[in-house]
Amino acid sequence: MKICLVLEGSYPYVHGGVSTWMHQYIQGMPDVEFCLWVIGAEAKQRGKFVYELPENVTGVTEVFLDDALRIEDDGKRRVHFSGRELEALKELMDCGHPDWECLFDLYQKRHVNPMSFLKSEYALDLLTGICLQEYPYIPFADTFHTMRSMLLPVLYLMGSPVPEADAYHAICTGYGGLLAILGGYINKKPVLLSEHGIYSREREEEIIRADWVTPTFKSRWIQFYYMLSDAIYKRAFRVTSLFGRASGTQIEMGCDPSICRVISNGVRFENFCSLPLKEDDGMIDIGAVVRFAPIKDIKTMLYAFFELSSRVPNVRLHIMGGVDDEDYARECRELIEQLHLSENVILTGRVMITEYFPKLDFTILTSISEGQPLSILESFSARLPVVATDVGCCRELIFGEKGDALGSAGYCVPPMHRQALADAMEKMCSSRTARLEMGKIGQKRVEMYYRHGQMIEKYRQLYIDVEAGLWQA
């Protein structure tokens, strides 16, 4: 059986949580043949993988969103659209419920050039109607360029070459989910979805804060991403999430409860459980396994550490990770200088965390959004307690799910709350005995519930169900 893994903006181009998870996932099923269908932002990334692909990856199909910007009108005769096609295109422009199968046929079988629609009288008429009804006081050019930015990547992706596989397994909704249902439709194969975070909710949070989106059009961009999520929720054979609340959110957004499954993350416990603990040397060393990206909110981390340093003189912060956003990383480095933290904040870059964990007393995570962070599970496996923001599954990891009587493995604070974060870190610094006890609890929790092998077997069952033909029932 050949599984096509559909990924967007992650593996195998960048390091990080989802990419690390994906690499270990493929390695965990050496008997399964995988091919990758990956979406990158820029064509200059082509072939520039930061991972050596496992032997059971037999092919990679790359598609880049900036290639859509280079599409030119092919100069062919005017395209005539049927009534069904026009209705599907209208729904797409309205961010409603388009007939995706009709659109797939349009761009896969009729091979319509994406610009042929965007430059057509039909598109102009539809856009004029949207402007008059929704944006009567906004310059037409602004609406045109917004709609073009929104639609062009989708039209381009729908005409992409489709790799052959026995199932299409998307690791997010959005553009990745769209390609997965395209592959399933063209080759009449099942579609699976595994969300680490709720993609549309994460995009909504980003758009609300984004400077690049004109406030007038923020609600339309948000609706656009919800439309893409709905497409795969309605067509997938199985939809998985990392924890119960995330599954509940998928159901609230229209996913059929009968197809939903919760499969928790798992880590290679044996790689961490025997690591030595740091000796008490008079310093408190705090680690953050995090890449430089706005969603990780490193600025709040730095402000909170600045506050902590005024209360506890013997503290150091080690930020261990690469750079996703160069501008954000520069702003963080400038903030370190402004706060005079250069001596006590160590930017290590990417490191082998198994080598670095024995230098730490505890770890922190200050993300604005998360799913079920591997960094927390790995920290717990090494007997290091955690201070984390109350996002995703962090609270459940720290305090346990229902029926877990092990106790607390750290502290949980509201996101973007520097005072609460500083207070929690101060508590953690105040008692080595408490830290050791919380570290033991965290390690036991991972040992019982979050091991890599347990996770792999649950995902393997999805493929067994596919092979058994249950998706056709």
Image: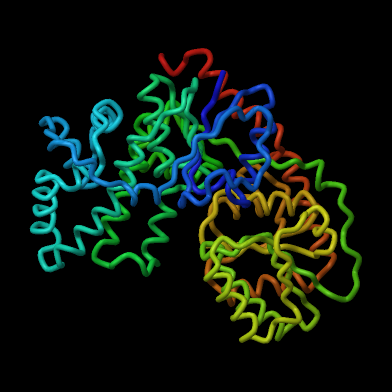
| Residue 96 shows up from this direction | no
Q: Quadrant of the C terminus?
A: top left
Q: To which quarter of the image does residue 80 belong?
A: top left
The location of residue 309, given as percent across then percent down, is 71, 82
Picture coordinates of residue 56, whole percent (x, y)? 65, 27
**Image quadrant where residue 471 sits:** top left
The residue lying furthest to the front in this view is 75
Q: Residue at x 47, y 34 (%)?
A: 193
User: In the image, is residue 46 above or below residue 413?
Assistant: above
User: Going by the image, does 136 lie left or right of 285?
Assistant: left
Q: Is residue 203 above or below residue 366?
A: above
* Place of residue 51 in the rendered image (x, y in percent of width and height, measured from the top left): 66, 44
Residue at image location 34% in from the left, 46% down from the top: 153
| Total marks placed | 0
Coloring applied to the structure: rainbow
254 horizontally vs 47: left or right: left
Q: Is residue 382 left or right of residue 280?
A: left
Q: Quadrant of residue 156?
A: top left
Residue 68 image position (x, y, % from top left): 35, 47
301 or 135, which is in the foreground? 135
Q: Quadrant of the N terminus?
A: top right
Residue at 29% x, 41% y is 155
Residue 347 appears anywhere in the view: yes
Q: Is residue 443 left or right of residue 28?
A: right
Vertical placement of residue 336 versus 375, above or below? below
- Residue at 59% of width from left, 48% of height from top? 372
Front residue (pair 419, 357): 357
Q: Nearer the viewer, residue 151 or 74?
A: 74
